[in-house]
Amino acid sequence: MSGLIFNLFIFVLASFVGFELISKVPPTLHTPLMSGANAISGITIIGALVIAGQVDHEFAQIIGFMAIVFATINVVGGFMVTDRMLEMFKKKDKNDE
């Protein structure tokens, strides 16, 4: 039980640090930061797959599945937003205007 409380404490602390970090980043650095977050989410997916595949406890498998789903949503959303932002920097044809 103390391990669960410690892990919950780490999660809450990481949430506060992440929120403060994201709120202090200027808008010009959002795209590189998002690319880094996508890489971290890729590591999360691999770790969740390994953990969910090795444990026999059903609760751990559910948590691993949820981690895979949320990390996948983060990766796909990050790529969509990055693609949309990169479209803003492409040159437009005069016929389109």
Image: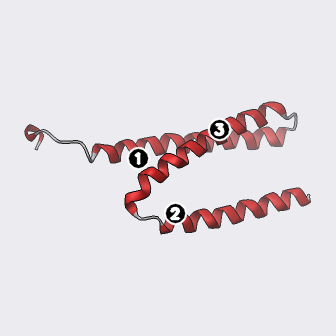
Q: Earlier in the sequence, mark 2 or mark 3?
A: 2
Count neighbours of disc 1 (C-alpha within 10 A) and say few if under 14, some if 14 to 19, many if 20 or more. Answer: few
In screen coordinates, is 5 left or right of 69?
right
Cα distance in 3D space between marks 2 and 3: 22 Å
Q: Which residue is mark 3?
A: 45
Q: Earlier in the sequence, mark 1 or mark 3?
A: 3
In screen coordinates, is 47 left or right of 38?
right
Label 2, secondary structure: give it.
helix
In screen coordinates, is 80 left or right of 20?
left
Where is residue 56 shown, x and y percent of the image? 87, 33
> Type of residue at label 1?
Val
Q: Which residue is mark 2?
A: 22
Q: Quadrant of residue 9?
A: bottom right
Q: Residue at x 24, y 42 (%)?
A: 90
Q: Residue at x 74, y 40 (%)?
A: 64
Location of residue 4 with respect to 88 vertically, above or below: below
Q: Nearer the viewer, mark 2 or mark 1?
A: 2
Q: Quadrant of residue 58?
A: top right
Please identify the residue farthest to the left as the structure is shown.
95
* Quadrant for the N terminus in the image: bottom right
Which dot marks residue 81? 1
